[in-house]
Structures are given as C-alpha cells and as structure tokens.
Amino acid sequence: MPHADSPSARLATRLAFLAAGFGIACWAPLVPFAQQRLAVDAGMLGMLLLCLGIGSVAAMMAVGTLSAQYGPRLIILASGLGLAGFLPLLAVAGTPALLGTALLLFGACLGSLDVAMNIHAVEVERAGSRPLMSGFHALFSIGGFAGSAMMTLLLSLGTGPLRSAMLGSVLIVVSITLATPRLLRFKAAEGEPHISMPRGIVLVLATLAAITFLAEGALLDWSALLITGKGLVSVQQGGLGYMLFAIAMTAGRLTGDAMTARIGDRAAVRWGGMVAVGGFLMLLLAPIAAVALAGFILIGLGAANIVPVLFRQAGAQTVMPANLAIAALATTGYAGVLVGPAAIGFVAKGIGLTASFWMLAGLLCLVPLSAAIATPQQT
C-alpha cells in the first residue's frame, strides 16, 4: 500500500481529479446538441439539468458517511467507472425521460467521485511538507480543458456525439484504472462521528464554495448557449469559451500553491473574486467574440484558487472533524455547480439568459467581500 506522502499516492489523487474534470467537461459541448435533438426550451433543459444535480447531491450526502466509515478508495473506483459508462448515453438519449435518467445516474457518479477524491486529497496534503491542494485541483482543470477541447474538436470535424462520447469514456477508464492500485486505504479515526451538519466557519466556507462552483457550473452548462445565442460563435464552436476558461483556471492553479504561500489565503480569495467578477462583466458586455472570450479567461484566472483555499481552510478549522468538514464543503460546493445551473434555466425562461448571468455576477461579489471571514487561518 502506498504511503500518504509518496509520489504514487499523489499521482493517484491527480488521476482521480483528472478523470472528474474530463468527464463533466465532455458533457458541456453536448448540451446544445441535446437541446436540438429533443427540441426543448430553456425551462425544460433546466429541469433536465436538475436531474444531474439531484443525483449528485443525493450521492454526496451518502458518500460523506461511507467515506468516513470505509475510506474513499472503493468509491473513487466505482464512481469513476460509472462516469465512463453513462457518458455515451447522454449523447444519444432521444427522450426527455431517458436523458433525465441518464443525467441522474451520471450526476450520482460525479458527485461520489468529487467527495471521495477531495477527502483523499486532504489526507495526502496533510502528509506532505508543502501545500498541494491547488495542484490537485489543477488536474481537474486540465481534465476540463482536455474534455472540452477534445469534444469541441471532434464535433467541429463532423464526428457524431456518440462516437465522441465513447472516446471520452475510454480515456476515463484508463485514468481510473491507473489510479486504483495507488490509492490510499484509510477511514475516519475510531470514535469520530460519521455524519455532521456544517456549522460555524464550515457553513461560511461551504456557502462561498457553492457560489464559486455555481459560476463554474453556469459556464459549463450555459455559456455555449449564451455566446451562440448572441451570434458571437457558431454552435459547433460553442465549447470554445469553456475551453479557454479551463485553460486559464489550469494556469492559475498550477501556480496557486506558490502564490498563496506568498500572499496568503485571504488575499487569494479577495483578489481572485474581484478578477472573476470583472471577467463576468466583460463577458456580458462584450460586443464581439474576442472580448467575450477574454472574459472567460479572466473568470478562470480569478476563480482558480478560491476553491482550493476554501478546502484548505476546511481542513484547518476545529469546529468539526476535518474529514466531515471536507465532505460538507464538497457536498455544498458541488451542489452549486450541479443544481445551480438548473435554477439558472428556470430564471432564464422568465427573464432571459443574459439577465440570469448578471444576477450570477452580483452573487459572486460575495466572495471577495467575505474573504476575511472565510480565512481566519492564514497561510
């Protein structure tokens, strides 16, 4: 069994994050095709996306407890393979009921993987002598870039959605297969509670994580429709914005551990949030495609290290056991990326997608404004 501070354990953690980011990003360019295939409006599409969120949140609430009891290794394996198995179904589901079911199962696998890999990451970081969380999350971003870029390229070249999704599934299986023998075997300490509601500083951290992930989820599920609806890019190139967002976030996270060591967690959250808000303003006010795409880049750079800092703060707080705090943060935070976009769909049906994004930009302002409260433990 690999040691928690071994290169093998770090590699396994990175592969799990890579698979998760890649899997969800493969779905993003398929959203416009799904809407066209089913001939549904924004409201119905929002209801379908809600299925993904429901599956994810339901699984997360269970996985937090199961990981505390049995450890995250088995959950990472099973959920990773499930993610690969359901992805092709999303590309061919021909009725709203079938797509909703597929999204429910796909979301359950994604939610399980997200919670388990973050618990594993905290354990590996604790054993190391330097911050690692931004680097781990960078692999999620790398996966997001790779999945979005691959799907956008294949679809632009005329490859069908099913074949494109099947290739994505193969790559997810390879990543999880390589990670599994290197994953740690551990569980919560004897006597620690296996379930607990977030409270105190953990509740603040979870709320800010939900807002940040909501912004990312909006870009994942709705940005292609936003920029294609404005006529800035074609439907085939709708994934370009999210791809640039993923590139920028990757660059920010690859240097994030060193940056936060220099300026501190508080400054990273405050300035990162301000830059991300500025990016949303550019995206929404853009008269041409180049300005909108620059906005995607700013959002990625600004948001890059907010979530890794929040996870580190959750691991350092003493209000509740660290493992349960991490699970609570992951559950609440990832609910934002998965449930939030469905809510945007409902709002967009009433006031329009652009107005929904303006509301999201206003909500994101809470992140820099709450930086001091969220980071009592300075790096």
Image (tube, rainbow, N blue to C red):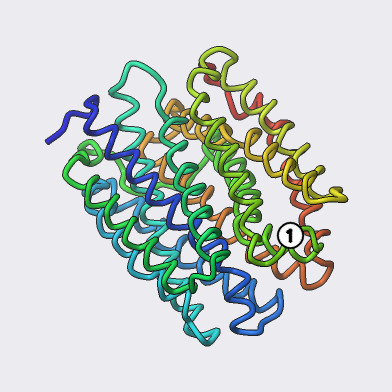
Q: Residue furthest front?
A: 157
Can you give x and y, in whole percent of width and height, for residue 52 in the image? Answer: 50, 67
Task: Give whichever of 322, 143 is nearer the camera.
Answer: 143
Q: Residue at x 88, y 50 (%)?
A: 287
Left or right: 180 in relation to 354: left
Is residue 279 in view from this perspective? Answer: yes
Q: Residue at x 81, y 43 (%)?
A: 282
Is residue 369 placed above or below 348 in the rendered structure? above
Left or right: 120 in relation to 267: left
Q: Quadrant of residue 168?
A: bottom left
Q: Residue at x 31, y 47 (%)?
A: 194
Is residue 202 placed above or below 233 in the rendered structure? above
Left or right: 100 in relation to 167: right
Q: Secondary structure beneath disc 1?
A: loop
Left or right: 233 in relation to 131: right
Is residue 186 in view from this perspective? Answer: no
Task: Give whichever of 79, 196 is nearer the camera.
Answer: 79
Q: Quadrant of residue 157?
A: bottom right
| Amino acid identity at mark 1 | Val
Q: Quadrant of the N terminus?
A: top left
Can you give x and y, in whole percent of width and height, for residue 11 in the image? Answer: 28, 35
Residue position marked by numbered label 1 in the rendering: 233
Can you give x and y, in whole percent of width and height, for residue 356 in the image? Answer: 78, 59
Is residue 253 placed above or below 100 in the rendered structure? above
Q: Residue at x 54, y 70 (%)?
A: 158
Q: Residue furthest top?
A: 262
Tag count in the figure? 1
